[in-house]
Amino acid sequence: MWGGRFAAGPDAIMEAINASIGFDRRLAAQDIEGSRAHALMLASAGIISDSDAAAIREGLLTVMSEIDAGEFAFSTALEDIHMNVEARLKELVGEPAGRLHTARSRNDQVATDFRLWVRDQIDGALAGIAAVQRALVAQAETGADWVMPGFTHLQTAQPVTWGHHMLAYVEMLARDAGRFADARARMNECPLGAAALAGTSFPIDREMTASLLGFDRPMANSLDAVSDRDFALEFLAAASICAMHLSRLAEEIVIWSSAQFRFVNLSDRFSTGSSIMPQKKNPDAAELLRAKIGRILGATVALFTVMKGLPLAYSKDMQEDKEQVFDAADTLHLCLAAMEGMLRDLTANAPALEAAAAVGFSTATDLADWLVRAAGLPFREAHHVTGALVRLAEDRGCDLPDLPLADMQAVHPAISADVLAVLGVHNSVASRTSFGGTAPERVRQQVQRWKEHLG
Ligand code: ARG
């Protein structure tokens, strides 16, 4: 493509480090879409003839069908997807192919292709997130009033409902979706027409190519257009946060499916056996979901490291953006699909959840609140009295509701038989009706809201 300036071809090692066709072939569809829009615009602006544009656009469709059919001969000597496509177009349509690269450069071309690709991935991530949310909402609806222990420091804290716990992740994933949507809105500007870095002297119509490619507008500064990859970083950052959320849920599923917890049963479809221990059913999918954040965050750090300190405008360093983003996008896609499948198949063990909810003095806060409400104690004193009752129960090896009333009254005379009602886990969760609280009636409201929202 630049033979005019060069007497010798590249060294084999030069070719190996330089070529991106091994991975950027994944941008083929976007590259061809961008080129077809560019050709149409060139003709409409009178820069090339209508017949040349028609030949180019038709030829590009042929190239695309060859690639789709697996019949395209990718060449490392042709370096990247842009030159591979153009060279094949030349073979197919001859001279008009040479006019396609008028008023553009591979710099604005690759920036355009990559934005289109990342935009598609964002749409895929949004669909994947919604699917996981629907699976969580279904779990929440089934177990809106199943009581389970809520933890802080992984120590029993207060009873909560299964539905409430599931909906916590629905909220997190909604913010993930919001981050992807924000990134999409910000990135949806078209770099095409920035050319190498300075714009072009041809009378191009950047509004036209932007709108043909579904962008909101052309990017306003040609230097910026060819040299930033912040859109890819935003995608990776949103993906990292989302993968972090999935990792936390995955970790809970690993814990919950253990013989010690028995909170959930994983389906055979989403677990594996052991080659030596016949009794084992391992939560491999959940463990891998717990781990995959490593790859995605790794890609994020890698691309930040590539981009930091790069002077304007394009530098070849930026070719290193793609593999990281490709891998992160594939990983996120797989994680969302695996999480959805695992959740759809997962059955919570309601009796085990409830039994666990009662141990560990989980209703101690309810007792303290009752002392405030019914006996008029200041909260600090109620906290102290309750602490003494917990110590008493601990000494006796029983739970709070098992303490005889007389022994409780010996600790504080204001305690009456009414207190027993608040010591039960069902009463405890039912009482937490504050907005955002764990009460089943609140959970059902939120389930309804999410069902309407997610469709
Ligand atoms: N393969 C290149 C990349 O991914 C395309 C842009 C090359 N531009 C250039 N001036 N060499 O970044």
Image (cartoon, rainbow, N blue to C red):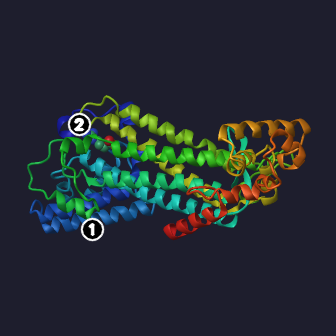
Q: Which residue is mark 2?
A: 313
User: Relative to residue 347, is residue 225 drawn left or right?
Assistant: left
| Residue 264 visible here | no
Q: Nearer the viewer, residue 55 or 33?
A: 33
Q: What residue do we see at 30% from left, 50% from top? A: 82
User: Residue 215 in the image: x percent, y percent?
Assistant: 27, 59
Q: Nearer the viewer, residue 186 or 414?
A: 414
Q: Which residue is mark 1?
A: 58
User: SS at mark 1?
Assistant: helix
User: Relative to residue 77, is residue 301 drawn left or right?
Assistant: right
Give the CA distance from mark 2 to mark 1. Answer: 33 Å
User: Relative to residue 143, is residue 325 drawn left or right?
Assistant: left
User: Relative to residue 280, is residue 26 drawn left or right?
Assistant: left
Q: Is residue 81 above or below residue 131?
A: above
User: Residue 41 in the image: x percent, y percent?
Assistant: 17, 62
User: Residue 390 in the image: x percent, y percent?
Assistant: 81, 39
User: Residue 280 in the image: x percent, y percent?
Assistant: 83, 48
Mark 1 CB near ligand 1 (8 Å cut): no
Tell me which image quadrant ligand 1 sits in. Answer: top left
Q: Is residue 118 above or below residue 196?
A: below
Q: Nearer the viewer, mark 2 or mark 1?
A: 2
Mark 1 surroundings: few (<14), some (14-19) or many (≥20) residues within 10 A: some
Residue most toward the top? 309
Amino acid type indicated by mark 1: Glu
User: SS at mark 2?
Assistant: loop
Amino acid type indicated by mark 2: Ala
* Rendered-image quadrant of the N terminus: top left
| Residue 96 visible here | yes
Mark 2 surroundings: few (<14), some (14-19) or many (≥20) residues within 10 A: some
Q: Earlier in the sequence, mark 2 or mark 1?
A: 1
The answer to which image quadrant residue 265 occupies is: bottom right
